[in-house]
Image (tube, rainbow, N blue to C red):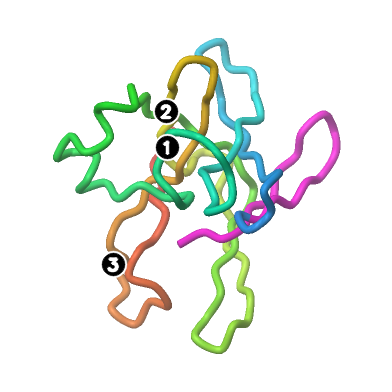
Amino acid sequence: MCGGVEFTFNDEMIRSYFPNPEARLPVKNKSGNIVLVPWGRREKQTGAFPLGGWARLESIRKGVWKKYHPTPVKIAVDRFMEKDKNGTSHWFDIDSSTFIQGLVVQNKSETRVYVVTISPEDKDAIHNRWPRILDE
């Protein structure tokens, strides 16, 4: 499900993990610049958005996210992390010509980003959700 990411921002390598309430994801804006956006919402965080850090592609297509004024975005990371059934972390590289699809939602002055997920192609995958990776 993509529980962590690694990316370069202002010449610094950053690791961001969803459980951290300060977690941010690097989103490429329309002018091509990278901006850090808060990643989802956790149980103890205030806000009007859904709990979690992921948005199923099917739910987006069904209009579930429409009330949050969603905008598809490119999340520019070098790698993402998944844990296996034993809790061991595994890092997966993202080619520079690809990105993880994100969904930015807005409500008044609050903005958050969710990782768009799909069903994995590998039937032996660790999770039943996998980040949607697209070509640039």
Can you name the residue that lies furthest to the right here? 12
Q: Which residue is mark 1?
A: 49
Secondary structure under badge 1? loop
50 to 32, vertically: above or below: below
Which stretch appears magenta? 1-17
Whether residue 69 sits left or right of residue 52 in the image: it is left
Can you name the residue that lies furthest to the bottom here? 86
Mark nearer the N terminus (1 vs 2): 1
Q: Nearer the viewer, residue 59 or 96?
A: 59
Q: Main secondary structure of the magenta part?
A: strand
Of the two numbered discs 3 and 2 in the rendering, the one whose residue sits closer to the viewer? 2
Q: Is residue 65 magenta?
A: no
Mark nearer the N terminus (3 vs 2): 2
Q: Quadrant of the C terminus?
A: top left
Mark nearer the N terminus (3 vs 1): 1
Secondary structure under badge 2? strand
- Seen at 58% across and 44% down, the residue is 45
Give the quarter of the image for residue 70. Answer: top left
Q: Which residue is mark 2?
A: 105
Distance, label 1 to label 2, CA atoms, is 8 Å
Distance, label 3 to label 2, CA atoms, is 27 Å
Q: Residues within 10 Å of mark 3 (few under 14, many from 20)?
A: few
Circle on res. 121 = 3
Of the two numbered discs 1 and 2 in the rendering, the one whose residue sits closer to the viewer? 1
Residue 120: percent from the left, percent from the top?
A: 32, 66
Residue 83: percent from the left, percent from the top?
A: 56, 75
Distance, label 3 to label 1, CA atoms, is 29 Å
Secondary structure under badge 3? loop
